[in-house]
Image (cartoon, rainbow, N blue to C red):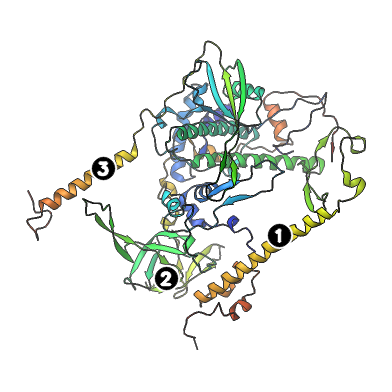
Amino acid sequence: MRIYGYLAKKVGDLTIKYSNFPESYVKKSYEQVYWKTPAGYPQYKKAQVARKKYRFTTNRPWTGQFRQQNEPGTLRKKVFLEPIRDWTFFRGDRVEVMVGKDKGKQGIVSQVIQERNWVIVEGLNTHLRVVGKDKNFPGITIQSEAPLLVTSDVKLVDPESLKATDVEWRYTEEGDKVRVSLASSRIIPIPKTAEETIDYKSKELYIDNIEKDTTADAATKITFAPKLRTFEMDIMEEMGIKEDRVPAKSYWY
Amino acid sequence: MSTRWYPIYQRGNPQLRVFLPNFWMKLVRPHPKQLPNIVHFHCSMEMTKYDIKNYLEKIYEVPVVDVRTKINMGKFKKDVVKGYVIKEDDVKVAFVTLPKTMTFKYPDLFEKSINEEEEHAKSLDESKKNFRKYIDHNKSRPDIPSWFSI
Amino acid sequence: MNTVIIKNIFRSTTTLCMRSQKSINTAAACIVKRDFHTTKPTQDLMEFFDAKKNWPETNIRVGRAWKLDELRLKSNTDLHKLWYVLLKERNMLYTMEHECNERVRLFPNPERIDKVEESMNNIESVIRERNIAYYKLETGETGERPVKDVINLIGMPEKYQPSEYDTPKFMNTRWVRPYLKHGFINSLAVKKFRRLYNEKIHSEVRKAHNRDFNHVQHLLKRFPNLDMDTLKAEYPNVDIEKAKRTKKSRGHFMPTY
């Protein structure tokens, strides 16, 4: 039962992974909370005045364009999304377009928009768009891709026959979850580009911020040694604080 | 015991200690007319004057002579459309006096920063101008490729 | 010696780089360099501001927050030190954010605040875990502040958090719970309140149910080849067979014989 629709998760996991932001930040950046009962006061029941319906588009939730499209007072028609159990499309996948003027063509997924069951395929399903037009400038025409629905408009490509195929998630003998093509029973590996985020192409290519980041060595070094002490006792011993007084008995009710 | 639980004190008990303080403080720009050894802070509402003094002396190692505090009440605002009233959060302001010999001048953080929007507009204008020049240049000679030019 | 190294490492670090082979390699060089770098970090009010070279920057990219599993490897002393590093970093970010707002500028990378706060929350939960383990071993209890499920004055269920007192209950004359003497309040006003409150909750549930039912009907109408198991998993409280039979769920599709 979704009584609190606004508490339900709206932004997809892949979107948060791509943004490389903490989930709380993504939530904060797209939500429009106009008023909230102050935190830390038990006498107030938790309540908030907030926008409940957001229109997710190709603009990512943390951008200014998203905020512009969801300005207070704008109401747009409800979008019905076909529920999907396991997401099978990732950035860098080779897919075949099943509809439109590029029907039958294959391309690489360049963006995944989980909130709308969309993928954007590089160079396919495009239209022309004029940007920068004003009174004394004719504008520049660019080609931009329109999103495609993963449920009906695109299919993954079988690695053996190079034809469109349905896929299924299965487990290998090692216990790894893999995508299997139903046409040839071949595993379709998740491409390396799937781990691309706004900040870096892949984890290896991330450049440390020397002043702010902890080095991997320092972070993975084990300094914990189990002791029969609480945190407070341990710190006091470390800092040489001696305390012999015993706390008087207290009662909880 | 949870780290956010503050036990009661009875006489003869061990001294109460805070190991992981969760207080925040931010240094804010002072009024235009202010003695050079007085610094203005906004801080957690729960902090007392002693807390502020200890916080600065122990964590930041800044000598503190005197602390005065006040609480600025948040503004009441009425929503234009729906009409409900909301109140902004209160702010605790701390005026910290440093020793006479120390002075602190609030730095100008945006002295060197470039106005990105202006830069962006400038480059856009530049490219528009180039494009127009190209169109004008090729007006009288259609069907000639763009690279064919002196 | 060990603590000195750790202190140096944590000196000005908040967030942690992505763990990767390359990062580990480059990191080793950094650590050596840092261990030789022994000047004391500046201890004055300028610690409330970012490094001077970051002032005009518009993009200050940092790594992710500390994870629980990484913090579990660290000793209590390290966690204690890291807490203060994070506390100072958070104060710095708050200061910079405030000044940016005052001067109507964009604060670069505001997600840094969330990263620091996430790290701090994780430190607290790791310490809590350790303390609970100690108390369970020593006293058999968690040592946390107790919470009781009680029926409150007007007969509604409530989570009651007992407080700590220096005198036992029977001696404490100032601790008054009137319903212990007189029973729960069952006046006309309370009855009316409970009735209306229950009605409110009931109507919320009913509306949510209707909303879901309507939504499922529309889904059935729009997506005739919908996977029923997925739909059932998504909307467990909706009677899908019933939704299928309604007029609303019939779409403009050619029947498949």
Q: Is residue A196 visible?
A: no
Q: Can you tell which mark lies on residue B123?
A: 3
Q: Amino acid at mark 1?
A: Lys
Q: Are marks 3 and 1 in contact (CB under 8 Å)?
A: no
Q: Can you tell which mark lies on residue A155?
A: 2
Is C152 on the left-hand or right-hand side of B81?
Answer: right
- Residue toward you, C89 or C221: C221
Residue at x-position 69% and y-position 45%: A44
Q: Nearer the viewer, mark 3 or mark 2?
A: 3
**Up-down: is C77 above or below C251?**
above
Residue at x-position 77% and y-position 55%: C193
Query: Within 10 Å of the Cα at label 1, are there few (<14), some (14-19), or many (20+) other Cα atoms?
Result: few
Please state the chain letter of the residue tagged with numbered disc 3 in the rendered image.
Answer: B
Please state the chain letter of the residue tagged with numbered disc 1 in the rendered image.
Answer: C
What secondary structure is marked by label 3? helix
- Residue toward you, B141 or A189: B141
**Up-down: is A215 above or below B60?**
below
Name the outermost residue toward the top: B101
Query: Within 10 Å of the Cα at label 2, are there few (<14), some (14-19), or many (20+) other Cα atoms?
Result: many
Q: Is residue A53 visible?
A: yes
Q: Are marks 3 and 1 on the same chain?
A: no
Q: Are marks 3 and 2 on the same chain?
A: no
Which residue in the protein does label 1 denote? C200
Q: CA distance from mark 3 to mark 1?
A: 59 Å
Q: CA distance from mark 1 to mark 2?
A: 47 Å
Is A243 on the left-hand or right-hand side of B24?
Answer: right
Q: Nearer the viewer, mark 3 or mark 1?
A: 1
